[in-house]
């Protein structure tokens, strides 16, 4: 989970503050010293940390805060606001050309940052909002990169334009845009070549592309796991070719995350998107306020709701809520819920978006894709009648289902027990939600 270590440390610091009741100036300064150390350990730029903690201290060490009835909460509120400001304050949208005109996005970055994968994700994201994308393969140095883009595009049903490795990237870019114009496409993504390190040849190539075609937006793709190097890379690319913004990848990995906290402040360029996984839908819009809330353990309910709305059809949700209220939920419904849940992403990450859940989930084993796959196999090994009538499943049927799913009988028993518990819980939840006049989706666990 992104920023897990930093989040844990900050939450412990603020927990100690809340335990003090009244706060003195010394208490605040001591807490900020710990905050500074936590940020530095998360690989946040030193100058950024220094300015950040100074801003908090100027606002927090005052009569209004220290003498308020909830001084600790006031300090946390200030930290949240400053953290949001540090990451850019407001959410930035790509400024695309009007409908009917072609928007050209050039992606650049070092090799291994996830540029080619991000290109496909970006195309899928904007296709869902009505754009007609074309992916253009400009990496003439690595045939494998061209093939990777073709594979990614094929999986998503998005056309990939390529001309092999003998044509210059600038000419490929011009030909791709002309192809898009003839084909009625309005969103061209140029996947350029990367290097292991910044060099003159790479920069010259990018400059040539920029001077040959009308680029709408140049986005730098950086790997969050490179820490401070990501900030240095961003500064160099901006000074050499000029970038309009940044996409940070691999923010879901075991990373200290300092790049996301430093890059806006150091470069002055906004972060538009963050990569939070391998699936196309895991390229998320970057919301500074929501990220600040996640880091401080306040959750991110808005993003959770958006993920749910994208995965769940409104009519389907109403039917499901009605079934749960009447305890008519069966294995077919469970299978549908599993499919919707998978669309939303990792269960641990989803629950971590609920306020206060981060620390509670630390030692809880969450079902992963493999576990969900085994559950799906168990249900698909049932007959259609068994799926619609869970009560008929007896020991002999369980044995047959286990053999069909390739799992031990104990897993089938465990699943059936969990299903019954979930069914009872969902009925209770539906009843509670019904009293408040609210419906909606339900998680199948």
Image (spheres, rainbow, N blue to C red):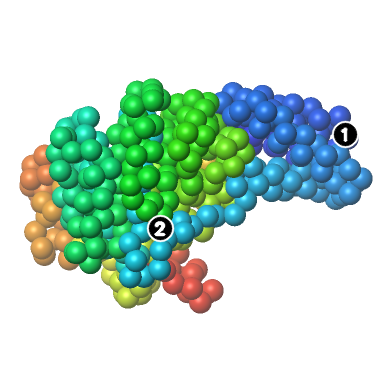
**Residue 371 appears at what percent x and percent y?**
26, 41
**Residue 28 appears at what percent x and percent y?**
81, 34
| Left or right of residue 35, residue 220 in this image | left
Frontmost residue, 353 versus 179: 179
| Res 202 → quadrant | top left
Q: Estimate how packed mark 1 is, as few (under 14), some (14 to 19) or many (20 or more) residues with alpha carbons within 10 Å.
A: few
Residue named by callout 2: 307
**Label 2 to label 1: alpha-carbon separation:** 42 Å
If you read the primary sequence from the N terminus, does the residue marked by circle 2 or circle 1 appear first?
Answer: 1
Badge 2 element: helix
Q: Residue at x 21, y 51 (%)?
A: 175
Q: Estimate how packed mark 2 is, as few (under 14), some (14 to 19) or many (20 or more) residues with alpha carbons within 10 Å.
A: some
Q: Residue at x 13, y 53 (%)?
A: 380
Residue 25, label in figure: 1
Frontmost residue, 382 versus 25: 25
Q: Is residue 183 above or below residue 366?
A: below
Frontmost residue, 87 versus 233: 233
């Amino acid at each position: 989970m992104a920023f897990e270590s930093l989040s844990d440390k900050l939450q412990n610091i603020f927990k100690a503050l809340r335990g003090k009741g009244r706060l003195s100036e010394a208490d605040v300064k001591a807490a900020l010293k710990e905050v500074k150390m936590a940020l530095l350990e998360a690989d946040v730029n030193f100058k950024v940390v220094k300015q950040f903690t100074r801003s908090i201290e100027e606002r927090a060490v005052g009569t209004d805060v220290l003498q308020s009835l909830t001084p600790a909460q006031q300090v946390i509120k200030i930290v949240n606001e400053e953290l949001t400001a540090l990451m850019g304050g407001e959410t930035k949208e790509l400024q695309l050309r009007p409908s009917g005109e072609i928007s050209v996005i050039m992606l650049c970055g070092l090799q291994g940052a996830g540029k080619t994968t991000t290109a496909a994700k970006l195309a899928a994201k904007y296709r869902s909002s009505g754009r007609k994308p074309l992916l253009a393969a400009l990496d003439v140095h690595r045939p494998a990169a061209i093939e990777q883009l073709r594979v990614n595009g094929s999986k998503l049903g998005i056309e990939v334009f390529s001309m092999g490795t003998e044509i210059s990237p600038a000419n490929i870019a011009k030909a791709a845009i002309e192809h898009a114009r003839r084909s009625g496409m309005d969103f061209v993504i140029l996947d350029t070549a990367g290097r292991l390190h910044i060099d003159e040849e790479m920069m010259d190539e990018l400059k040539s592309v920029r001077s040959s075609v009308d680029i709408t937006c140049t986005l730098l793709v950086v790997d969050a796991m490179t820490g401070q190097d990501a900030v240095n890379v961003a500064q160099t690319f901006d000074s050499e070719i000029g970038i309009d913004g940044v996409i940070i990848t691999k923010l879901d990995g075991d990373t200290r995350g300092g790049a996301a906290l430093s890059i806006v402040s150091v470069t002055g360029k906004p972060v538009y998107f963050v990569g939070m996984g391998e699936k196309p839908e895991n390229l998320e819009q970057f919301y500074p306020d929501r990220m600040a809330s996640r880091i401080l353990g306040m959750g991110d309910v808005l993003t959770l709701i958006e993920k749910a709305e994208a995965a769940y059809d409104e009519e389907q949700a109403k039917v499901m809520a009605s079934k749960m209220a009447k305890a008519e939920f069966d294995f077919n419904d469970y299978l549908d819920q599993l499919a919707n849940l998978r669309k939303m992403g990792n269960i641990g990450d989803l629950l971590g978006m609920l306020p206060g859940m981060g620390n509670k989930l630390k030692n809880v084993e969450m079902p992963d894709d493999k576990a969900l796959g085994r559950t799906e196999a168990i249900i698909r090994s049932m007959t259609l009648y068994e799926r619609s009538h869970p009560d008929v499943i007896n020991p002999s049927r369980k044995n047959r289902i286990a053999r069909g799913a390739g799992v031990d009988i104990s897993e089938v028993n465990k699943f059936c027990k969990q299903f019954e518990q979930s069914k009872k819980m969902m009925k209770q939840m539906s009843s509670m939600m019904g009293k408040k006049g609210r419906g909606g989706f339900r998680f199948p666990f």
